[in-house]
Image: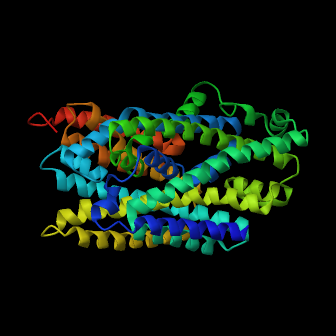
Amino acid sequence: MLVVFILYLVFTVGLAWWYSRGARTNEEFVLGGKRFSGTALALSERATGESAWLLLGLTGHAYAEGISSIWVALGCVIGILFIWMVMARKLRFQTEQKGVMTVPGLLGKHFPGAEKQLGMLSALIIVFFFLFYIAAQFSGSGIILQKTFNLDPVWGIIIGSAVVTLYCMMGGFIAVVVTDVFQSILMIFTLVVFPIIALFIAANYHLPVVQMLAEADPSLLSLTQMKTGGAAVLFILSGLSWALGYTGQPQLLSRMMAIRSDQEVRRAKWVAAIWTILAYIGAILIGLFGIVFFKSGYLSQDATLLAKDAERILPVMVMSLVNPILAGILLSGVISAMMSTAATELTVSSASITEDIYSNVASRKAASRKKLWINRILTLSVGLVAIILALYMQDTVYGLVSYAWSGIGSSFGPALLLMLFWKRFSRAGAFASLISGTAGTVIWKNFLLEPTAVSERLGSFVFAFAMAVLFSLLFPEKSKNTA
């Protein structure tokens, strides 16, 4: 199994190096220079979107909560389908028309005269929340490598993060997309093949799945965890609220911005849709089968570990149920999820600092070659800070991602939706969205989550959207925006 994992790492870095040899300009480093097909970008977006959160967080959530986790999965699927089916074509057109390379740049160009302020504020928000997001991925790599090779989690974090940072520095967007395509195939292999393996094992040992779930805990078969009335409605809305955050995630939307044509968008959206549906069904099934195998005694040797951390259910099942070679392949799919997401967030963070902060404060315009090297240095710097966070943060992968997801989605989601679909959206509304989305997430997470039982993903998004509309009406643009 160790050999399989080492081969995976070597192949990933080699692939990134081979395809990155032509990345000679900052434009190619940041957005790929229109090199990739819609299919490749769709697979890259899916690999980026489905991080350690899906393969560890959601499988663990299903293991702990049962079929009620379907609302989280459904919220994610709705969000993914929306950004591909509704937003992708408009984003591609706006990117080409305005000649920008980042989401902050897209917002800034929409309001001439406010480019610097909007760009710098947006970049700061991205870097702040992405540090938590990247730390969650690095933390996930520590979990996997500890369970797989009995490696100290600290070394697991360092190894996984070092590989990601290395290939991001080599080729930026190009390296990330190329490795994402390979990693998305590994991920879907794990999420489709392993539930089928688990089903055959359960059938072979005549395990009554539904009966055993009911015996473990009747609430595991409840769609609302036995909640009724208003509590049940809030529970469902909390799960579905994951959909809202997709509308403002720069690491996903940058793939749509990089697509060459509308024809490629049409092809890409169906690739993304099929991949997503298969992946989420697989993640929920893995968690539910985990309950069954644990109750049957097949995972009893890891009872203490799972009692402390439900997010270890997938690696525990893989190690217990399949042979070492197949286990190495399946767990490489889990590592792929973390590496692909962390890689994109590293490049988006460095690009935001370079394009939307450095370019706005520099006394003169930097040459493309110089900005390329600044991007590489910043990639390394952001990676190092995220490693430190991963080593000291105590929250779960699910919790870290939920927080970062809410912050980014609530800040940028309302602004981008209104920019694309509402002609009366103003720069005041854009600032209101960014500020209230960020502040709302921090306040809601720390002070309002428990009293209201409403997730920060829902509360902060609704608040930011309302503020964006209100400030657009109170402070409209002086002249009609023709961008």
Relative placement, left or right, of 14 versus 62 is left
Query: Vertically, is 74 above or below 292?
Result: above
- Give residue 453's quadrant in the image: top right
User: Which residue lies at the image location 68% right of the left edge and 34% below the top edge?
Assistant: 225
Looking at the picture, does residue 479 appear above or below residue 298? Answer: above
Task: Point out the residue furthest to the right here.
Answer: 205
Count of numbered circles in the view? 0
Question: Which residue is at the front of the view, 235 or 68?
Answer: 68
Residue 287 visible here: no
Residue 206: image location, x then y, percent:
91, 38
Residue 261: where, in percent of width, then height? Answer: 32, 40
Q: Is residue 220 visible?
A: yes
Q: How is the image coloured?
A: rainbow
Give the x, y percent position of residue 300: 85, 56
Split into 4 quadrants, where in the image is the C terminus? top left
Q: Nearer the viewer, residue 202 or 35?
A: 35
Report the residue at 55% width, 51% height from top.
184
In this picture, residue 62 sits left or right of residue 266: right
Percent coordinates x, y for residue 131 in the rendering:
44, 62
Q: Quadrant of the N terminus?
A: bottom right
Outermost residue toward the top in this view: 229
Position of residue 29 in the picture relative to residue 481 (left or right): right
**Which residue is at a point 61% across and 74% down the rendered structure image?**
154
Picture quarter containing residue 421?
top left
Which residue sits at x=36%, y=54%? 35
Residue 416 in the figure: left or right of residue 333: left
